[in-house]
């Protein structure tokens, strides 16, 4: 039996040819391809500005810096996210303030945000977990009313949409102050690795472009194109957060096929929901009426008494790869001690989500036969027989 992976990037000869073109051009890092990718990405999501960087973690770091987060500040976010979300806050010398996620979802609970605000709060960093948009309208309203910038960790959400004031708009327009994206191979669009920041604020965009290249006063494109000798300067601390032209060329091809990718992922999610609804106690993810997910991942809640490790091993034995639910940063060794973070609310839902959920395979190339194979593997796994017996009883 061939193994069904959790994810598989959509790459073919189009990306190969794009990289070949760049290699033969002689300009292979942060040049014309990066500029074109930024313009096309901004146009796709409806943003005034888009700035490409090396990955989403560096994007988050620059976003936090741009809104003024520094040592001793606090940033409200979730523990229930890949550790990069919290790490980026600590890169600024600031303190992540963790609030719980919603009981019936995987995103920050807006009801808990205001109670976590203190005079030291400098930003709200919300996450569109697994590609599902969080309740931005409520979060942005809180941020606006309390004069706190809102940064969107949209690492998983390229191609997702939200109903905003009666209109469907792409995540990344942005609706908060800054949105940050990832192009890691597990994401819907990949450049091998890479990231993007979108914003409506030209001053933020100027800062991103300065900081991503060591705060060099004159960028490579201008220097190489000049008919006069130019000496650059470095007016402030910067970073090496550049994207290569080879990666950008791949990203441009990925963007062209993104609508097709998202449409197929939504079809697969619909099939999962229909098949799994017949399993008593199985909790499938719910898409709010105001959200359209790209279904970067499909995360199910296991019925009571089903053990997560045993379930995952049984699936693997049947040729199906899975992953456990999203991690919690506050449970990791890097976040021990009282100085690394602050917990502003109980994190019961966050911990439950990590320990009682499993991510199933979902990628564009999945066939309907593979979907049925996955569902059958679930029905053959540990706990299902007991569940069926209990239902009959």
Image (cartoon, rainbow, N blue to C red):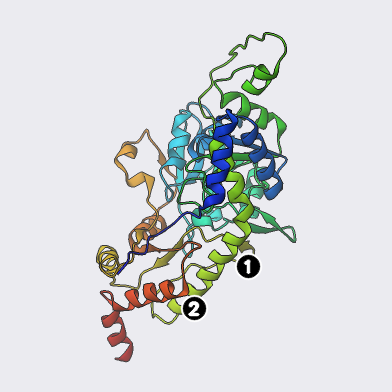
Check disc 2 and report its element: helix, strand or loop.
Answer: helix
> Please, is residue 87 above or below residue 163 in the view?
above
Q: Quadrant of the C terminus?
A: bottom left
Q: Which residue is mark 2?
A: 274
Q: Classify residue 148 by image quadrant.
A: top right
Q: Nearer the viewer, residue 385 or 253?
A: 253
> Please, is residue 127 above or below residue 367 in the view?
above
Q: Nearer the viewer, residue 38 or 229?
A: 229
Asked whether, in this view, residue 3 is left or right of residue 212, the answer is: left
Asked if residue 342 can be seen in this view, the reply is yes
Q: Nearer the viewer, residue 278 or 227?
A: 227
**Residue 289: numbered disc:** 1
Asked if residue 154 can be seen in this view, the reply is no
**Residue 161: numbered disc:** none
Gap between marks 2 and 1, in whole Å?
A: 18 Å
The spot of residue 184 in percent (x, y) is 47, 45
> Please, is residue 373 above or below residue 29 in the view?
below
Q: Quadrant of the N terminus?
A: bottom left
Q: Judge depth for marks 2 and 1 and give the one in front.
A: 2
Q: Earlier in the sequence, mark 2 or mark 1?
A: 2
Q: Residues within 10 Å of mark 2 (few under 14, many from 20)?
A: few
Q: Classify residue 164 by image quadrant.
A: bottom right
Q: Residues within 10 Å of mark 1 (few under 14, many from 20)?
A: few
Q: Classify residue 209 by image quadrant.
A: top right
């Amino acid at each position: 039996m061939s193994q069904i992976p959790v994810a598989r990037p959509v790459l073919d000869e189009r990306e190969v040819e794009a990289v070949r073109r760049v290699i033969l051009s002689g300009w292979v890092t942060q040049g014309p391809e990066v500029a074109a990718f930024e313009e096309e990405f901004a146009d796709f999501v409806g943003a005034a500005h888009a700035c490409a960087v090396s990955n989403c973690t560096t994007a988050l770091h620059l976003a936090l810096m741009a809104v003024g987060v520094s040592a001793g500040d606090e940033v409200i976010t979730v523990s229930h996210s890949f550790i990069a979300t919290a790490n980026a806050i600590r890169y600024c010398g600031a303190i992540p303030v963790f609030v719980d996620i919603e009981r019936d979802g995987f995103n920050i609970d807006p009801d808990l945000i205001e109670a976590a605000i203190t005079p030291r709060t400098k930003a709200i960093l919300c996450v569109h977990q697994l590609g599902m948009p969080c309740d931005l309208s409520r979060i942005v309203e809180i941020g606006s009313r309390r004069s706190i910038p809102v940064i969107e960790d949209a690492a998983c959400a390229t191609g997702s949409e939200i109903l905003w004031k009666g209109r469907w708009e792409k995540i990344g327009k942005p609706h908060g102050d800054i949105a940050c994206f990832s192009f890691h191979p597990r994401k819907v669009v990949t450049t091998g690795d890479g990231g993007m920041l979108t914003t409506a604020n030209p001053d933020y965009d100027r800062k991103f472009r300065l900081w991503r290249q060591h705060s060099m006063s004159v960028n490579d494109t201008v220097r190489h194109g000049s008919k006069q000798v130019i000496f650059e300067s470095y007016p402030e601390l910067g970073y090496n957060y550049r994207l290569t032209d080879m990666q950008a060329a791949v990203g441009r091809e990925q963007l062209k096929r993104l609508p097709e990718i998202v449409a197929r992922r939504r079809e697969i999610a619909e099939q999962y929901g229909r098949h799994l609804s017949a399993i008593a106690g199985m909790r499938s993810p719910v898409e709010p009426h105001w959200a359209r997910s790209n279904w970067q991942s499909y995360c199910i809640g296991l019925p009571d008494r089903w053990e997560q490790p045993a379930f995952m091993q049984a699936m693997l034995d049947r040729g199906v790869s899975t992953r456990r639910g999203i991690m919690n940063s506050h449970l990791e060794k890097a976040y021990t001690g009282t100085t690394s973070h602050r917990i502003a609310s109980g994190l019961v839902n966050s911990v439950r989500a990590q320990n009682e959920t499993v991510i199933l395979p979902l990628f564009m190339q999945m066939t309907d036969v593979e979907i049925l194979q996955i569902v059958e593997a679930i029905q053959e796994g540990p706990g299902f027989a007991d569940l069926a017996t209990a239902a009959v009883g």
